[in-house]
Amino acid sequence: MKLKIIIACIVSVLFLNNSYGQDSAQDVLEKIQKKFNSINDLTANLTQSVNGNVNLKGMVYYKKENNLRFEFKNILLISDGETYWSYNQKDNKVVISDYENEGNKILSIRQIIYEYPEDCEMTTYELNNQTVLELIPKDDTFQFKSIKLFISKDYLINEAIIDDPAAGEVEIKISEYKLNNNLPEALFIFTPPEGSEIIDLR
């Protein structure tokens, strides 16, 4: 599974949250969008496991409209909505590209919560005293078979399980959400370190 596909799943987890109760899937979606509109920025911890083995652990930052920052060990992904930077600290290499590049648009939170659901069948059910929202693609456009989202008691997603044919079972855990703390714009701009290899694809 490509890193961007994994990140897209993580981003979807961050914003599929609200009070679900006995609502229909469409009701849930509308509440998701309403919640998203109320969030100006957020910070959260995340851990990702593939087939039971942890392979990503770090932080995610978001600020409207498409400002994103993912911090993992040796990997930094940043977008200010216009430019996308991918920095590999171990190799000291930076790849720069336009945010509107189709490969980068997968990081768009707005696209994930307003466009992706149109291409998925959505259902809700109870499992182990938790409400689960499941998304199943209507065709083979997406690189996953399903995503199961587990809702915490405070109406935030605390876990997601992604069934991916190539990678296997991908589990994402999100914790310690901090909402609307006025994150600085500078957090979403990246200056390549002196001496780094720069690959500019713009």
Image: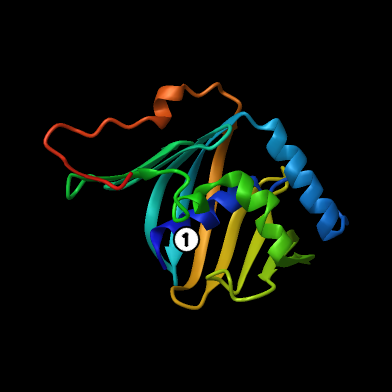
Residue 176 against residue 9 in the figure, above or below: above
Q: Position of residue 118 (x, y in %)?
A: 73, 60
Q: Is residue 45 left or right of residue 17?
A: left
Residue at the farthest front position:
202
Q: Nearer the viewer, residue 154 or 56?
A: 56
Q: Residues within 10 Å of mark 1 (few under 14, many from 20)?
A: some
Q: Dividing the image into 4 quarters, which one contains the N terminus?
A: bottom left
Residue 19 in sight in this render = no
Q: Is residue 23 above or below residue 146?
A: above
> Quadrant of the rendered structure where residue 117 is?
bottom right
Q: Residue at x 72, y 42 (%)?
A: 154
What residue lies at 73% left-to-right and 38% top-to-bottom?
35
Please say if 7 is above or below 191: below
For residue 89, side relative to residue 160 (left or right) = left
Q: Which residue is mark 1?
A: 5
The extreme bottom residue here reads 165
Residue 49 figure quarter? bottom left
Q: Position of residue 50 (x, y in %)?
A: 43, 68
